[in-house]
Image (cartoon, rainbow, N blue to C red):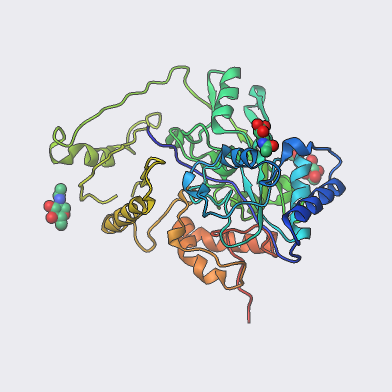
């Protein structure tokens, strides 16, 4: 497959004090961190600012940014990037960004389609907390489980499982550079989904930092929040530190095959329509997907489609490609779900609408894209959000909004 797809990570904050300069903001933040954690950190290896060394700063910012479009010069940049090396640093960061009134974005694998884990266009200044140094994986074959920290990639997780057993696996995405933290917040689907469901269905516990900086697990967060963080999208309820996942049985030998047909060989587009009819009826161990570059098919679709356009870095006219994909999206209208037209939250799309800068009126706007992503579950997500983060600390362009104030 040619592209990797995926997801997320992410974020929050609030505005009370505007620091006078980025230097004093950083100093204030560091002082505040020291007061809120007992675990020391090396400034050299955890703090990156353009002022200190712009090439190192850019390297860290770009390290896991999967969509180069959001690194353009015109895009807003974080005042600094902090790479916590201990879970207590994440708790302290949330306490401190709230205290200092600076908006914070959190990144695990950086796959977020809209770059929300490392760019904030509506709330400035902002900082990025990059979880790439929190990537421990502890596989326990005896009880079929593993704890995996948010900054680990899906590929690392699969590798660590395979090191211990050839007959255990985890049903998540195909793209190995996905950060597991954000990936599961949007469900996490992959080639074992027919047999075992989504990654989110196979999570048995989680550690998350809430808006007060408190570390919660499944029993202390409660089942509502535990439900919301496994599919309700990233960065609305807290910062995921780690997931405890259930391992599933896999065969020692996996067979993979590719059948390639040109349009000329497939007279009348029979293959695609046949696939639609049989794909869900075959044994669950068989996963078949179709990738096509040019399609002219009038069949209806109850399947998920990913629209992708890729262009070389050297292409100076990205708007051409973006307009093309928007046309494609409109063109498909008659053939896909309607009322609502459904969308996958980990294919985040700001064209569906976005929150304004932390206003109470976001609920109405958000109903549009919220229903696309979550259908009837949107209302429940809003109720949970209002309960666990009433000050809307964890927010971004498409975070779950608060319930409107009554009266
Ligand atoms: C920035 O860091 C790089 C890599 O460590 C180093 O080679 C370079 O000299 C530094 N630049 C400045 C201006 O300190
Ligand atoms: C969850 O957290 C609570 C409160 O900190 C603790 O008492 C409990 O043992 C934890 N549960 C698990 C399964 O770790
Ligand atoms: C698809 O539908 C359009 C409009 O109804 C029709 O003109 C076209 O021939 C159809 N194409 C195929 C491949 O059936």
Residue 212 seen in render: yes
Position of 144 with respect to 290 (left or right) is: right
Residue 214 seen in render: no
Q: In percent of the image, x 28 and y 39: which residue is there? A: 292
Examine the rendered structure and indicate whether residue 260 appears above or below residue 82. Answer: above
Residue 405 position within the rendered picture, expressed as x and y whole percent measured from the top left: 64, 75
Please tell me which residue lies in front, 270 or 46: 46
Kindly give the residue lying farthest to the bottom in the view shown: 407
Position of 98 with respect to 65 (left or right) is: right
Q: In percent of the image, x 35 and y 46: which residue is there? A: 303
Please tell me which residue lies in front, 368 or 384: 368
Position of 77 with respect to 354 (left or right) is: right
Please tell me which residue lies in front, 77 or 322: 77
Q: In percent of the image, x 46 and y 65: which residue is there? A: 368
Residue 239 position within the rendered picture, expressed as x and y whole percent measured from the top left: 67, 48
Examine the rendered structure and indicate whether residue 296 appears above or below residue 341. Answer: above
Q: Residue 39's quadrant in the figure?
A: top right
Position of 153 with respect to 314 (left or right) is: right
Viewport quadrant of the N terminus: top left
Residue 175 position within the rendered picture, expressed as x and y whole percent measured from the top left: 47, 34
Question: Total number of numbered labels?
Answer: 0
Examine the rendered structure and indicate whether residue 260 appears above or below residue 72. Answer: above
Q: In percent of the image, x 48 and y 44: which residue is there? A: 67
Viewport quadrant of the C terminus: bottom right
Residue 118 position within the rendered picture, expressed as x and y whole percent measured from the top left: 58, 49
Please tell me which residue lies in front, 124 or 307: 124
């Amino acid at each position: 497959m040619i592209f990797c797809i995926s997801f997320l990570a992410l974020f929050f904050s609030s505005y009370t004090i505007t620091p006078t300069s980025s230097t004093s903001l950083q100093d204030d933040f560091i002082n505040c961190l020291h007061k809120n954690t007992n675990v020391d950190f090396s400034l050299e290896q955890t703090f990156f600012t353009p002022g200190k060394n712009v090439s190192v700063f850019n390297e860290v910012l770009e390290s896991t940014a999967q969509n180069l479009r959001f690194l353009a010069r015109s895009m807003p940049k974080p005042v600094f990037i902090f790479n916590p090396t201990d879970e207590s640093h994440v708790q302290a960061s949330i306490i401190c960004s709230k205290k200092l009134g600076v908006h914070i974005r959190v990144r695990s694998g950086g796959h977020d389609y809209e770059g929300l884990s490392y760019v904030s266009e509506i709330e400035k200044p902002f900082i990025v907390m990059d979880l790439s140094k929190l990537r421990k994986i502890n596989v326990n074959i005896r009880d079929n489980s593993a704890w995996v920290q948010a900054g680990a990639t899906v590929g690392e997780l699969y590798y660590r499982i395979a090191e211990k057993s050839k007959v255990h696996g985890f049903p998540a995405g195909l793209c190995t550079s996905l950060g597991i933290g954000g990936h599961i917040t949007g469900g996490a689907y992959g080639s074992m989904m027919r047999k075992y469901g989504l990654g989110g269905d196979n999570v048995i516990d989680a550690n998350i930092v809430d808006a007060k900086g408190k570390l919660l697990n499944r029993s202390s967060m409660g089942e509502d929040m535990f439900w919301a963080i496994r599919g309700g999208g990233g960065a609305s309820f807290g910062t995921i530190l780690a997931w405890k996942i259930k391992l599933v049985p896999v065969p020692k030998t996996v067979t993979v095959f590719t059948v390639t047909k040109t349009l000329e060989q497939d007279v009348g587009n029979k293959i695609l329509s046949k696939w639609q009819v049989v794909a869900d009826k075959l044994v669950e161990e068989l996963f078949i997907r179709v990738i096509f570059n040019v399609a002219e098919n009038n069949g209806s679709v109850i399947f998920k489609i990913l629209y992708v356009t890729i262009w070389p870095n050297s292409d100076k006219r990205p708007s051409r490609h973006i307009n093309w994909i928007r046309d494609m999206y409109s063109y498909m209208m008659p053939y896909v779900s309607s009322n609502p037209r459904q969308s996958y939250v980990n294919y985040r799309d700001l064209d569906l609408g976005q929150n304004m800068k932390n206003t109470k009126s976001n609920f109405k706007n958000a109903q549009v894209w919220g229903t696309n992503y979550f259908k009837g579950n949107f209302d429940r997500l809003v109720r949970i959000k209002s309960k666990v983060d009433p000050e809307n600390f964890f927010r971004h362009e498409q975070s779950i909004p608060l319930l409107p104030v009554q009266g």
